[in-house]
Image: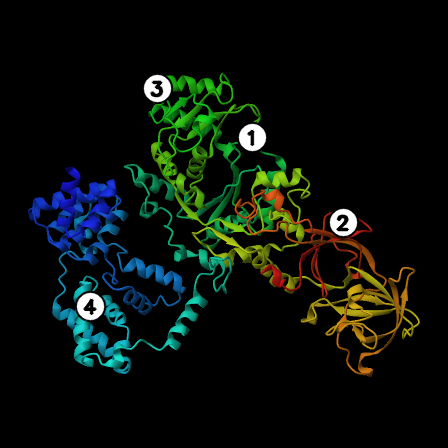
């Protein structure tokens, strides 16, 4: 019966029966709408007109602070707020999508990407920046200043039909020539946007009706030509423009041209984040009677400075996804003149190792960032424990004896110890601290239900593993759910930036800070970055190491940051890649070749050239033009010789790539063959084949050639690289570690990721030759080996034997795209 009464009430407000039934499915919305309608009926009587009903529904569906419901309903019922702009307060209210889009363009938002503009327009055609709603959200304290409220919401402002007529007429006059040419193909949203900009509180439908009437008066009725669609050519141009300006990250992981640097994406208002101290303006932020005083104290401590943190767990090596997190956290602070903490979440001593702490610090520095301060969750163990005791005292936490397997999943049974007396939990928690329970025998749990339905998350558990910093002082350790937000509070973080999977923990984040009456930061989520043909899970990388598929965490075939550094990826390229991906909310899975393209862009300008031969063939120049070897000057960067030269010897015996010679060449082969000379790069000489020397088994062992000056005859079809008096080195050539895009997807790889290994992912050339210009190279020095690719010196190098890793090829392999 109650449902039928509510259904009747909602339809009387002007909702369709279908919309009313949908509303009833949302218990919170239906309860708020029922309360609003009942209060309005006390003023208006049992009959509520559709316009008022629409406002009441908009209020009920968008109001977050239910304390203000009665206050706002009184303004709607008394007709002081009687238009959408006053409640929803922006000049695109009531416009169609296309009208809203043109209005946005008119108001100098032309620089926004099309996809962003369209998202805004879809919002604007519903309701966007609220006047009344925005006011109560940004003024959470009692009492409300009604004079200020009414001024900000246009209460008492009357927009006459004459004012609307004048504003529309002025807009039409500004565009009259174009209107007369384009007639009804002209987008009328531009006119409505200009009129609304002048008359902020005018009703959108009245403006639209006035535009329609004046345009009809100017142009007359539509003719046949006005009814024709715009030419397809124009539409195609628009689609091409949209595609060019659309999302930098496409669904298939491709990137378009990125016009904004990461700093530009993160600076100021670009992300629509709250300003320091204005946490309460964030949708979903919970305001308590202590909030404003705590924010005031927070601003006194921080001076209004942006504060972020990068909080890794020291139980593994950072991977490419962490690079985005590092860039986002450190970058947002840097772009807004703030500071960023590097805080280790060292709450699980079983899995933490010293090498992980060191590697994480190294990787942050390698990417070019310096933490304001390096902190540890363990720095705050005493305070965290004291707060846990306070939670128990407030009846918000209890000691539980359910085992770990009983707590797994989302539909677990309520703890039978949930309502145990506070005094009992205090004694038991103290007993936990003193080591009177075995591991798994007791936990401290918080009394809340998280957004994903998980009930009463664990705050503390027993672990008898010594801690790397606190030793044996503690045998109970806090969990992430308990520690993270409180450490953020202690460090007065303004923006707690984390990946999307932590969204389900946002409610517990706010709940815990407010339960203890401490400063509550704001958690913002962004999309995680993943790559195809890769696994980044710590557990799975350990399996790869254990099975011998890779050598260690820094094997260059992995996508950990230490592995990418070892392979030769410059940090600038990784940062540029993160900038291209952009600060997206949706999770993105990118193609590795896009990262490799960023690597080529950087190395092309920074890696000096050298020559190396992987599979060598000995060549004897029988008429060498000098009695001894010549010194050849080779530019470090052929495109910019101002960057210097290096010297290599040119002797009667040189070595070329075996693939650069063929006795019986196929059509199109342009390198050395009978009757087909080639040039030797940088020497100014051309060699021509005279004799092929073969071994007992018929294999070519060496070539005898003659040489001439390149300018003394016809220009050869090709110039090849070579080495003379070279150094012997080892070269490691890497390919993808996995054969399929998603090696962890059982539908793509039924046998599991270990069955998907590419057995040809590493090819070692043990006797490669390289010119002597690289003799003094150190680990991680990078070179372009001409015609072969970009290479980096591996740390395995030792005196007398350099080891090179191929970073990327010179050109993108079409098969990888």
Residue found 64% across the figure and 61% down from its top: 603
Name the residue at the left extreme. Answer: 45
Q: In the displayed structure, would residue 380 be above or below residue 699?
A: above
Residue found 44% across the figure and 30% down from its top: 408
Q: Residues within 10 Å of mark 2 (few under 14, many from 20)?
A: some
Report the quarter where the C terminus lies: bottom right
Q: Which residue is mark 1?
A: 349
Residue found 15% across the figure and 41% down from its top: 4
Q: Which mark is residue 797?
A: 2
Mark-to-mark CA distance, 1 and 4: 66 Å
Mark-to-mark CA distance, 1 and 3: 30 Å
Relative horizontal placement of residue 29, taking residue 120 as reference (left or right):
left
Q: Which mark is residue 420?
A: 3
Mark-to-mark CA distance, 3 and 4: 64 Å
**Residue 143 seen in render:** no
Tell me, yes or no, whether the two marked residues, 2 and 3, touch with CB atoms within 8 Å: no
Tell me where residue 9 sits by quadrant.
Answer: top left
Mark-to-mark CA distance, 2 and 1: 35 Å
Report the quarter where the N terminus lies: top left
Relative horizontal placement of residue 628, taking residue 498 as reference (left or right):
right
Q: Which residue is mark 4?
A: 208
Q: Earlier in the sequence, mark 1 or mark 3?
A: 1
Pick the residue in front: 238 or 86: 238
- Which structural element holds mark 1? loop
Q: Residues within 10 Å of mark 1 (few under 14, many from 20)?
A: some
């Amino acid at each position: 019966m109650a449902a039928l009464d509510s259904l009747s009430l909602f339809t009387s407000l002007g909702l369709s029966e279908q919309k009313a039934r949908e509303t009833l499915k949302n218990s919170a919305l239906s309860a708020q709408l029922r309360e609003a309608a009942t209060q309005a009926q006390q003023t208006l009587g049992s009959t509520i007109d559709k316009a008022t009903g629409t406002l009441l529904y908009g209020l009920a569906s968008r109001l977050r602070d239910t304390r203000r419901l009665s206050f706002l309903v009184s303004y709607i019922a008394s007709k002081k707020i009687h238009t959408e702009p006053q409640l929803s307060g922006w000049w695109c209210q009531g416009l169609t999508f296309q009208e809203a889009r043109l209005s946005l363009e008119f108001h100098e938002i032309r620089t926004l990407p099309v996809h962003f503009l369209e998202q805004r327009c879809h919002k604007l055609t519903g309701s966007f920046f609220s006047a009344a709603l925005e006011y109560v959200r940004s003024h959470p304290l009692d009492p409300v200043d009604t004079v200020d409220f009414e001024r900000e919401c246009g209460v008492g402002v009357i927009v006459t039909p004459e004012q609307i007529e004048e504003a529309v007429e002025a807009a039409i006059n500004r565009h009259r020539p174009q209107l007369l040419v384009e007639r009804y193909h002209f987008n009328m949203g531009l006119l409505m946007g200009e009129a609304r900009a002048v008359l902020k509180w005018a009703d959108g439908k009245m403006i639209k009706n006035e535009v329609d009437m004046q345009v009809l008066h100017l142009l007359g009725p539509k003719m046949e030509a006005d009814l024709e669609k715009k030419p397809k050519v124009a539409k195609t141009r628009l689609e091409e423009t949209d595609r060019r300006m659309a999302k930098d990250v496409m669904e298939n992981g491709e990137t378009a041209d990125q016009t904004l640097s990461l700093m530009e994406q993160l600076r100021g208002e670009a992300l629509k984040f709250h300003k320091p101290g204005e946490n309460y303006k964030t949708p979903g932020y919970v305001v308590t009677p202590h909030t404003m005083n705590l924010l005031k104290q927070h601003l006194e401590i921080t001076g209004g400075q942006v504060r972020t943190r990068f909080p890794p767990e020291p139980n593994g090596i950072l991977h490419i996804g962490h690079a985005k997190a590092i860039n986002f956290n450190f970058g947002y602070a840097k772009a807004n003149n703030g500071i960023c903490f590097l805080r280790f979440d060292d709450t699980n001593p079983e899995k933490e190792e010293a090498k992980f702490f060191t590697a994480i610090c190294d990787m942050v520095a390698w990417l070019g960032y310096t933490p304001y301060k390096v902190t540890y969750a363990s720095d705050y163990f005493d305070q965290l424990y004291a707060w846990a005791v306070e939670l128990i005292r407030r009846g918000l936490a209890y000691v539980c004896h359910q085992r770990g397997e009983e707590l797994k999943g989302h539909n677990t049974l309520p703890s039978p110890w949930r309502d145990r007396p506070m005094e009992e939990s205090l004694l038991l928690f103290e007993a936990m601290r003193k080591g009177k329970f075995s591991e798994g025998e007791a936990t401290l749990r918080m009394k809340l239900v998280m957004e994903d339905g998980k009930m009463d998350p664990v705050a503390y558990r027993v672990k008898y593993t010594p801690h790397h910093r606190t030793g044996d002082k503690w045998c109970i350790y806090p969990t992430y759910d308990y520690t993270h937000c409180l450490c953020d509070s202690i460090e007065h973080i303004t923006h707690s930036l984390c990946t999307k999977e932590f969204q389900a923990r946002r409610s517990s984040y706010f709940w815990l800070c407010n339960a203890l009456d401490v400063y509550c930061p704001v958690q913002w989520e962004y999309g995680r970055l993943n790559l195809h043909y890769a696994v980044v899970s710590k557990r799975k990388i350990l399996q790869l190491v254990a099975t011998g598929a890779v050598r260690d965490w820094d094997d260059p075939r992995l996508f950990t940051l230490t592995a990418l550094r070892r392979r030769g990826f410059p940090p600038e390229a990784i940062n540029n890649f993160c900038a291209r991906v952009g600060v997206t909310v949706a999770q993105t899975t990118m193609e590795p070749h896009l990262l490799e393209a960023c690597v080529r862009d950087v190395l092309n300008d920074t890696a000096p050239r050298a020559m190396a031969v992987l599979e060598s063939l000995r060549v004897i120049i029988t008429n060498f033009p000098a009695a001894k070897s010549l010194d050849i000057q080779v530019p470090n960067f052929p495109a910019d010789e101002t960057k210097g030269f290096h010297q290599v010897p040119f002797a009667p015996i040189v070595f070329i790539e075996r693939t650069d010679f063929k006795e019986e060449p196929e059509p199109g082969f342009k390198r050395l063959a009978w009757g087909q000379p080639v040039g030797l790069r940088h020497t100014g000489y051309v060699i021509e084949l005279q004799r092929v020397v073969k071994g007992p088994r018929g294999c070519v062992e060496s070539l005898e050639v003659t040489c001439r000056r390149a300018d003394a005859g016809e220009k050869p079809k090709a110039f090849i690289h070579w080495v003379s008096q070279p150094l012997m080195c080892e070269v490691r050539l890497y390919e993808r570690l996995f054969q399929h895009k998603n090696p962890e997807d059982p539908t793509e790889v039924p046998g599991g990721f270990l069955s998907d290994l590419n057995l040809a992912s590493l090819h070692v050339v043990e006797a490669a030759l390289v010119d002597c210009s690289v003799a003094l190279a150190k680990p991680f020095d990078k070179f372009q080996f001409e015609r072969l690719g970009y290479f980096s010196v591996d740390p395995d190098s030792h005196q007398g034997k350099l080891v090179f890793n191929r970073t990327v090829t010179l050109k993108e392999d079409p098969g990888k795209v």
